[in-house]
Amino acid sequence: MEINLLQEKPLSAPEGTAIRQLSVFLPNRVGSLMALTKLLHDHHIEVLGLSMQDTTEMTLVRLILSDPEGAGMLFIEKGIPHTDCPIVVVELTESGQRLTECLSTLLAAELNIEFCYPLIVRPKMHPLLALHCDDGEIAAQVLNSSGFRVLSQGDLSR
């Protein structure tokens, strides 16, 4: 059974190319986030989504980027420890009500949301929500079949 993650075909990536999130642990120091974003900017990689969790010793930064593969290679080259995981990005066309419908859809499918955050970019001027669920492929399929637009990397990297 083939899962179609998109209602529209992306222009710059194969249909269904999953969005990858890179997570980086930064030292909890003034300027650490700025240094990371400057490094990405200097290599023409845009930050499209960002979430931070701060502790006394370190900060976990979750990033959705215009070029996750290039960023991963850059992080390896610079010795920046990171992890990479697929993430579901869903478009919400009517702010409050659609968020409730989105969450209800995932609840009905008995999917657990491990974390979520909004994106900085909005290709069609609609809110975008990044979701990491216990089963991302099923989450994307359930949301798509319920009428939500699930984005691919090509939708964000244009």
Image (spheres, helix red, strand yellow):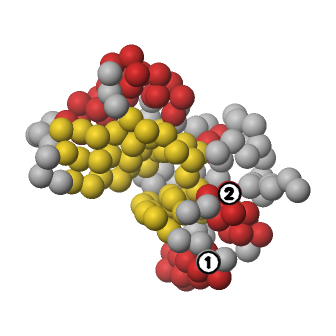
Image coords of residue 134 (percent x, y): 56, 63
Q: Residue at x 55, y 52 (%)?
A: 87
* 45 sits left or right of 103 in the view: left
- Secondary element under disc 2, as helix, strand or loop, is helix
**For residue 7, what is the image quadrant?**
bottom right
Disc 2 crowd, CA 10 A, few/some/many (<14, 14-19, 20+): some
The span from disc 2 to disc 1 (Cα, nearest Å) is 13 Å
> Label 1, on which residue?
110
Q: Residue at x 38, y 47 (%)?
A: 62
Q: Residue at x 18, y 54 (%)?
A: 55
Q: Residue at x 62, y 77 (%)?
A: 110
Please say whether residue 96 is visible from this viewpoint.
yes
Number of numbered markers: 2
Q: Amino acid at mark 2?
A: Glu
> Label 2, on which residue?
137
The quadrant of the picture occupied by the N terminus is bottom right
**For residue 53, what is the image quadrant?**
bottom left
Against 123, is 143 above or below? Answer: below
**For residue 28, what is the image quadrant?**
top left
Name which of mark 2 and mark 1 comes first in the sequence: 1
